[in-house]
Image: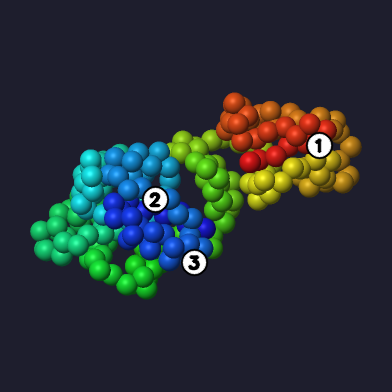
Amino acid sequence: MARILIIEDELSIQKMIEYDLKQLNYEIDSALDGFEGYKKASTTLYDVILLDIMLPNMNGLDICKKLRQEGNEAYIIMLTAMDDEYNKIKGFEIGADDYVTKPFSPRELAARIKAGLRRKGVSKNDDTLYYNDIKIVQSSYQVFKGLEKVDLTLKEFELLVYLVINKGRALSRDQLLNKLWGFSYDGDSRVVDVHIFKLREKLDPQAEVLRTVRGIGYILI
């Protein structure tokens, strides 16, 4: 599913947008402050950023300009109560993709997001998985932690996908072995532990989220 960041300082508007978009099965992050929103946008990959212009600490135009200078390719839709021509032109000049004037209807915003995702070649129901700051693109076997690409072997990739899909469930070594290596596998059963170790080293060195369940196996929390 597509991941969307809402940077909006009016809590009631932020919550309304968040609720409406979650009903459409989008993955949503939010920020009430301009600097907080910029930090999230610059450290995590988003498909769409909904960006208010009037924000505390850092305004939306500055955020948009800085993100584009850094090579951020998210589809940016500016949200603002200001509908004058100057702000619209300024937004487009610094790299905004679209512009929605408050008040707007949820249907209009959803339609603009859908159109933006279509232009980017992203489907709402694509094969992208998200876990914390990790993005997994299954069709291309790519993994990103924040904005950094992580190189995984095929089995490490398959293990990560299975753990994310089963987040919160304790998985036994036998279960992982049978699922990923097959019932006919007759090699060393410690192969699961080795791959878990390597995955931790690349994604979670402190083992804060990928934990060992004594006597059972492993769990991604």
Q: Between 50 and 23, which is closer to the camera in this rendering?
A: 23
Is tag 1's residue or tag 2's residue first in the polypeptide sequence? 2
Label 3 vs label 2: CA separation?
A: 16 Å
Name the residue carrying label 3: 23
Is tag 3's residue or tag 2's residue first in the polypeptide sequence? 3
Is tag 3's residue or tag 1's residue first in the polypeptide sequence? 3
Q: In the image, residue 117 lies at what x, y percent?
A: 41, 62
Q: Furthest-front residue in view?
A: 12
Name the residue carrying label 1: 216
Residue at 46% in and 36% down: 148
Could one spot residue 215 in this view of the protein? yes
Name the residue carrying label 2: 30
Q: In the image, residue 164 lies at what x, y percent?
A: 63, 46
Question: For the residue marked with disc 3, what is the amino acid?
Answer: Gln
Proximity of marks 3 and 1: CB atoms separated by less than 8 Å:
no
Question: For the residue marked with disc 1, what is the amino acid?
Answer: Ile
Label 1 vs label 2: CA separation?
A: 36 Å
